[in-house]
Amino acid sequence: MQQTLIIDLAQHLGEEITLKGWVRTIRHSGKLLFIVLRDGTGEVQCVAFQPDLGEAAFDTAKRLTMESSLIVTGTAKPHQKQTGQFEVAVKSIQPVQIAEEYPIGKKEHGPDFLLSNRHLWIRSSKQWAVLRIRHAVYYAICDYLNQNHFIRFDSPILTPNACEGTTTLFELDYFDEGKAYLSQSGQLYLETGIMSLGRVYDFGPVFRAERSKTRKHLTEFWMMDAEAAFVEHAQNMQIQEELIRFVIRRVLETCDAELTLLERDKEALRAADAPFKIMTHRDTIDYLRSKGSEITHGSDLGAADEVLLTQDSPVPIFIEKWPKEIKAFYMKRDPNDPDLVLGSDLIAPEGFGEIIGGSQREDDYELLLSRMKAENMPLDDYQWFLDLRKYGSVPHSGFGVGLERLVTWMSGIHHIRETIPFPRMIYRIYP
Ligand code: 4AD
Ligand code: MG
């Protein structure tokens, strides 16, 4: 019989249906057998009564274990106790495979054990919920961009040059061409794309050989880079704000059950869907110092500073106009202060830290060249990038969203490693 998905049960009340999935839990009492079956789209309790199945079939069904795969036919009906929920009165149960004793049980497991069993851990309900939120966030970002005339422009992963400095580059030998690097961000290539398509984005894995062992760092993560011609610094931040508020609303609308399962504070998410704050880097440092931080002017924020900064703010905060020494070579100088650049970091509330980095780009050939020379960059590898400033250079801006950072915030979970199917960190590459 054709498979019905659990998520569609409401449309099949009273009908005989077939469900296919796995045993979440199983228990029996006398002539009754209760199986919570999950099929990827949801979970439903299936209740089997021995006289309906026959004694032999009932005994076979009793041998099903946690995570065994099975096919159930029965009738869908409203749950006897929980309103809005359904259950299935079982007519037959067909085991597909009886699972061995499942290593992830009810007892508490340490993170190392769970990460080593990531291929199984993803079936747990919280992991399931986070992965579904990731899916929703991913498509919300694409929908916003598509609705706003950004064209997808896939950037390469194997590159001859660095985008975000050389300290976090993964290097490999590339045939006779010498060294190649795994991309840290597609931004530089997107800057070529706007000259053809106006507004572009990419969305894919990027790589950073991060030595940081924190709850916010992966060595392989997904980034959406967006870039737009004739957009300047202030409008660049406006686009980021619209995008993030669009994502928040989409997650609240489509992931209510997942957020509930994760015990996410939905009010906090709702409150973040309001005008974002903008502070200069200078004012940010003064504010943090007034709150007791020892951070000094000219330096980057640490994790504790990000927490302190947002602790009284329900909305994300843009930190703009950074000292040029601590930001990337491509950022445009502030015309009012040559020591600053027109860059912004967007800091999520509730201590979730930086979710976006962006800037207006230096569009003047000489200024860009002098900055690259000052940083001893290998100019030959960037000739194509400099060319853009020779042939119809325009003011332009862009930004990069860290997908896993955003999903961590939306889900309200502690560690970024749970937001990607197979996290890659400095101390972990298995499975
Ligand atoms: O701030 P970043 O380094 O900016 C860029 O790479 C720009 N080229 C983007 C652009 O303008 N198109 O990285 C962007 C975002 C960060 O704000 C953060 O959310 C995420 O990428 N990110 C990481 N996420 C997980 N693990 C890491 N190690 C990350 N490093 C950055
Ligand atoms: Mg950054």
Image (cartoon, rainbow, N blue to C red):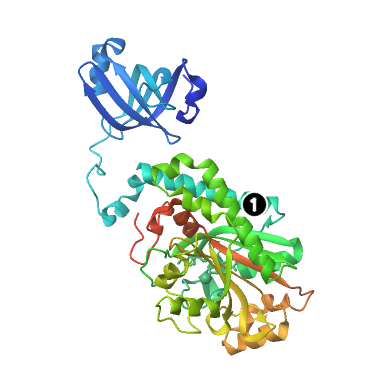
Give how far across and how far down residue 237 sits, in percent.
63, 66
Measuring from the top left, give residue 218's x and y in whole percent: 42, 63
Question: Residue 318 occupies which quadrant of the picture?
Answer: bottom right
Query: Which residue is more in the foreground, 98 or 401?
Result: 401
In the rendered structure, the answer to whether residue 228 lies left or right of residue 329 reads right
Residue depicted at 63% across the width and 82% down the height? 380
The image shows residue 241 at horizontal and vertical percentages of 61, 60
Q: Name the foreground residue: 55 vs 175.
A: 55
What residue is rendered at 68% in x and 51% in y? Answer: 146
Report whether 321 appears left or right of 412. right
Q: Which residue is mark 1?
A: 144
Vertical order, 320 against 203 (above or below): below
Which residue does the image show at 54% across and 80% down from the upper left? 282
* Residue 128 is at least partly visible in this image: yes
Q: Nearer the viewer, residue 385 or 367?
A: 367
Determine which quarter of the picture holds residue 363: bottom right
The three-letter code of the residue at mark 1 reads Tyr
Displayed quadrant of residue 55: top left
